[in-house]
Structure formats: C-alpha cells, structure tokens
Amino acid sequence: MVDQAAQLVPDLLRASAADDWDSAALLHQDIAKAEAAADQQKRSLRRHLPNSLFLPVPRSDLLTLIGVQDRIANTAKDIAGLIIGRRIRFPPSLQDPAITLAETSAATSHQALKAIQELDELLEVGFTGREEIRRVEDMLKAVDELEHRSDELAVHLRAGLFNLERELPPVDVIFLYQIITLLGTVADDAESVGDRLQILMAK
C-alpha cells in the first residue's frame, strides 16, 4: 500500500502539468486511500506482532522497518495535498524534469518493496542463505543507485527553478521548492527501508 501511494505521484504531476484537475483530484483521493490503508496495516502489525523471545529478528527492528515504510506513504500524501490544495503546476520547462524526478523516486520505492518481499525467504534460511542474501543485496544496491539518481535530478530541478524565480509568484516558488524536497524525500525514505533491511540481515 505504501508503494501504491508512491506510484501514483508521477501520474498526479502529469495531470497537474496538463491542467487536468478532475483527474488530479481522483489521484489525490487514491493516494489518500492508499496512505490510510497503509496506516491501518501499520497499526494492525504493531498490535499483533508478538512480544516473543523466539522472533527470528528483534521486534524493535521490525517495528522500525514498518515505521520507515509508512513515511513513504505519508510523504506521497503530503505532495498530493500541496498540489491539489494550491493547484500547483511546475512551469512548462520544468514539467518533464519534475515528472522524471517523481518517476525515479517511485522507482526507488518499488525497488525497496521488491527487497522487502524477499523477507520471508530470508527468514526461512535464518538470514544465512548466501544466494538469498546476495539477491537482496543486489536489490538494495539498486535502491541506493536510484536514490542517488533522484538526488541529482532534484539538484538540476532546483537550479532550473532558481533561474525562473523572478518570473513566478513568490508564494508559488516556495511551494515548488517544497514539492521538489518532498519528491526527494520519497526516495530517501525508500533508501532508509533498504538500510533497515540491511541491518536485519547483518544480525
């Protein structure tokens, strides 16, 4: 559900760029629903995760992993709220770079999801299976590379916005910078998911 929220953000930016606010509003609703479902699952996991000495990994590490995943959906909802609440559109020359940044951040989230989906196999082999660990490590390396790419894209997008600042309403500029930061945060949080998974593998 967390990744579902992240995957809708590029489509929201496309709708905004096309001035299609009906579609944008529906996408905002879908992101909010995915975030709410992720919240519900987070609460359920926290309630039902056993306080057992026989868990294969520390309970606190699993709870941290759940919390870090949840931040991705929260950030996607924040982005959607800003875009819809203020009907924010990137200037035409920055629309494609903004969508590319959103796509790269969404790809980072999806790659983190693929790594998390290997958790059951890692548990089966007690985090000692060489093949399973190598596969997950390759996935986590891809997460890091995508996050680094999103950082680069955000830097270029901020530079492009800086060059246009004098032509835009100052308040819009402030919120555009905020959206760029939040788009990068999606990738940062996805990388944090990978980092927490790596900690589990190291124990």
Image: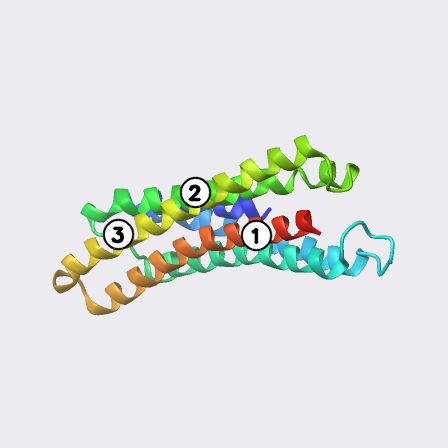
Percent position of residue 154, x then y? 31, 52
Answer with left or right where residue 173 lies relative to residue 10. Answer: left
Residue 90 placement, left or right of 140: left
Q: Which residue is mark 1?
A: 195
* N-term-proximal mark, 1 vs 3: 3
Q: Position of residue 81 (x, y in %)?
A: 43, 59
Give the residue displayed 69% in from the left and 53% down from the top.
41
Give, as a three-letter code, the residue at label 1. Answer: Asp
Q: Secondary structure at mark 2?
A: helix
Q: Rounded to the nearest whole Å, what is the CA distance between mark 3 and mark 2?
A: 18 Å
User: Image quarter for residue 84?
Assistant: bottom left
Check the image and report above or below for 54 versus 137.
below
Q: Secondary structure at mark 3?
A: helix
Report the side of 194 relative to 183 (left or right).
right
Q: Name which residue type carries label 3.
A: Leu
**Image disc number at residue 145:** 2
- Out of 51 and 39, give the one closest to the viewer: 51
Give me the residue at 29% from left, 60% from top.
176
Are the two marked residues, 3 and 2, in contact with CB atoms closer than 8 angstroms? no
Q: As shown in the figure, which amino acid type bears the numbered disc 2?
A: Glu
Mark 2: few/some/many CA within 10 Å (<14, 14-19, 20+): some
Which of the two discs, 1 and 3, sits closer to the camera?
Answer: 1
**Number of residues whose C-alpha sits closer than 10 Å to that of mark 1, classed few (under 14), some (14–19) or many (20 or more):** some
Q: Which residue is mark 3?
A: 157
Q: Position of residue 196 (x, y in %)?
A: 61, 53
As drawn, the label of residue 109 is none
Q: Residue at x 27, y 42 (%)?
A: 96
* Residue under the image location 65 percent in, 60 percent down: 64
| Nearer-the-camera pick, 117 or 133 | 133
For this orientation, the residue located farthest to the top is 131
Q: Nearer the viewer, residue 16 or 158?
A: 158
